[in-house]
Image (cartoon, grey):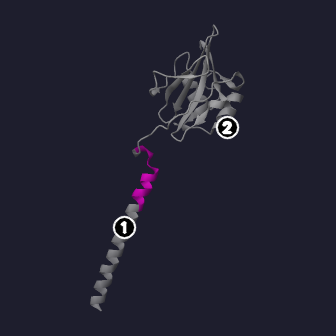
């Protein structure tokens, strides 16, 4: 009987050791699946949108000292699987000069990137500044900060889907309310 007891104890210990090892493997896989900090971020390939049409432009408030007016082309807004909100921005100076750019905002890092500049003929030219840069909040023309804080981002993540972003822009309903105005 003593021999059977020793064998049972050894088998039990082997089984516990095996279960512990299996649990550790499962926990490690679980952690890997949900640990985004250890996974390198990869930007998806972009596809440039069609040139913006006047009827699709959604103006938004930037600041009381803004020297330009700004609008986003509702048809160009997308939320990529990489967590970047992409859109076409139209800026109009007080003298009426218009500039068009295709841009992205990465909520997780509060950064912006200009992918392309629109030409008068509706085509695109690659931006020379196609690097991620931090968004500046305090400028008079703080269009990127306004878009990120008021319409696109919440707690360093994309606030909602495209449909909801467009709805907020159309109704000028910001995520921050009137706190910054």
Q: Which residues are magenta?
A: 26-37
Label 2 belongs to which residue?
163
Q: Find numbered disc 2 in the image and state the secondary structure of the residue it sits on.
A: helix
Q: State the separation of the CA atoms marked 2 and 1.
A: 47 Å
Residue 64 visible to an observer of this rendering: no
Corner quadrant of residue 132: top left
Residue 90 drawn at (x, y percent): 61, 20
In front here: 93 or 178? 93
Residue 94 x, y percent position in the rendering: 63, 9
Ranked by sequence position, the earlier of labels 2 and 1 is 1
Q: Alpha-carbon neighbours of circle 1 within 10 Å: few (<14), some, or many (≥20)?
A: few
- The relative height of residue 69 versus residue 11 in the rendered view (above or below) is above
Residue closer to the observer: 23 or 95? 95
Give left or right: position of 26 versus 77. left
Q: Nearer the viewer, residue 68 or 103?
A: 103
| Quadrant placement of the N terminus | bottom left
Please name the residue shown 33% across and 71% down the image.
17
Q: Is residue 80 visible?
A: yes
Q: Residue at x 40, y 64 (%)?
A: 23
Q: Quadrant of residue 63?
A: top right
Residue 47 numbered mark, or none = none
- Seen in the picture, residue 83 relative to 170 is either above or below; the reply is below
User: Where in the figure is residue 128, as x and y percent of width and height?
Assistant: 45, 21
Residue 154 position, x and y percent, is: 56, 36
Query: Dot 1 corresponds to which residue?
Result: 20
Depicted 83 relative to depicted 71: above or below: below
């Amino acid at each position: 009987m003593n021999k059977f007891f020793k064998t049972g104890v050894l088998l039990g210990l082997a089984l516990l050791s095996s279960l512990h090892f299996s649990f550790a493997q499962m926990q490690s896989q679980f952690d890997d699946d949900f640990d985004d900090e250890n996974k390198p971020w990869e930007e998806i390939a972009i596809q440039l949108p069609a040139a913006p049409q006047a009827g699709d432009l959604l103006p938004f408030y930037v600041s009381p000292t803004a020297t330009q007016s700004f609008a986003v082309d509702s048809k160009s807004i997308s939320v990529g699987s990489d967590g970047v909100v992409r859109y076409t921005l139209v800026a109009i100076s007080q003298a009426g000069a218009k500039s068009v750019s295709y841009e992205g905002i990465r909520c997780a890092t509060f950064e912006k990137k200009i992918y392309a500049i629109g030409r008068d003929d509706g085509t695109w030219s690659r931006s020379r500044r196609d690097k991620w840069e931090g968004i500046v909040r305090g400028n008079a023309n703080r269009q990127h900060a306004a878009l990120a804080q008021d319409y696109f981002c919440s707690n360093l993540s994309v606030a909602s889907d495209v449909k909801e972003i467009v709805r907020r822009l159309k109704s000028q309903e910001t995520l921050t309310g009137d706190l910054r105005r």
